[in-house]
Amino acid sequence: MAHQSDIEESAALQLDFQKLQQVVAACGEILPVAVQDSETQEVLIIAYVNREALRLSLEERRAVFYSTSRKEIWRKGETSGDILHLDEVRVNCEQNSLLFLVHKGGRGVCHTKDASGEHRQSCYYRRLTAAETLEFLKT
């Protein structure tokens, strides 16, 4: 199994099709959350919430998630300063996923950094090519 940093900075396609099974088995009741910039409509990140994280997001008007790796509440930006201020929460038709519309309160969104050492503006910084490799997007 590849190290997380190898996956994050690789041009090789290494999709984790077992992620959701592992998350549910380890974390119990959660929902996926697509997070989108309210102004630009750019998709920033996919994360998860449990009931408590959703309640805290609504109360605090900021993106609060459930960290599936640490198995704890994760207030986005608590250590990095890259807070996502919550403008609106939408629920999909089947009520099995959420959309957080947010505006950024910091330098970036992703925990990874680009070649210049800056936090990336979105977790979607690579595109899949026809050759099934990943191409880094210019920021």
Image (cartoon, helix red, strand yellow):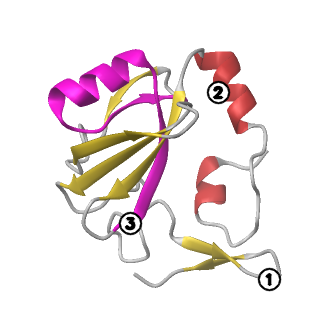
Looking at the image, residue 46 lies above or below residue 94: below
10 Å neighbourhood of mark 2: few (<14), some, or many (≥20)? some
10 Å neighbourhood of mark 1: few (<14), some, or many (≥20)? few
10 Å neighbourhood of mark 3: few (<14), some, or many (≥20)? some
Mark 3 falls on what kind of element? loop
Image spot of residue 109 (x, y percent): 34, 56
Q: Which residue is mark 2?
A: 23
Which quarter of the figure has residue 74? Answer: top left
Image spot of residue 14 (x, y percent): 76, 58
Image spot of residue 124 (x, y percent): 51, 65
Mark 2 falls on what kind of element? helix
Q: CA distance from mark 1 to mark 2?
A: 30 Å
Residue 130: numbered disc: 1
Point out the residue furthest to the right here: 131
Looking at the image, residue 28 lies above or below residue 121: above
Residue bounds of the magenta highlight: 41-68
Marks 1 and 2: CB-CB under 8 Å? no
In the image, is 84 to the left or to the right of 16? left
Amino acid at pointer 3: Arg
Marks 1 and 3: CB-CB under 8 Å? no
Residue at screen point 30% across, 40% down: 76
**Counting residues from the N terminus, which is met first, the one under dot 1 or under dot 3?**
3
Q: Is residue 47 magenta?
A: yes
Q: Which residue is mark 3?
A: 120
In the image, is 81 to the left or to the right of 12? left
Amino acid at pointer 2: Val
Quadrant the C terminus occupies:
bottom left
Q: 132 or 96, which is in the foreground? A: 96
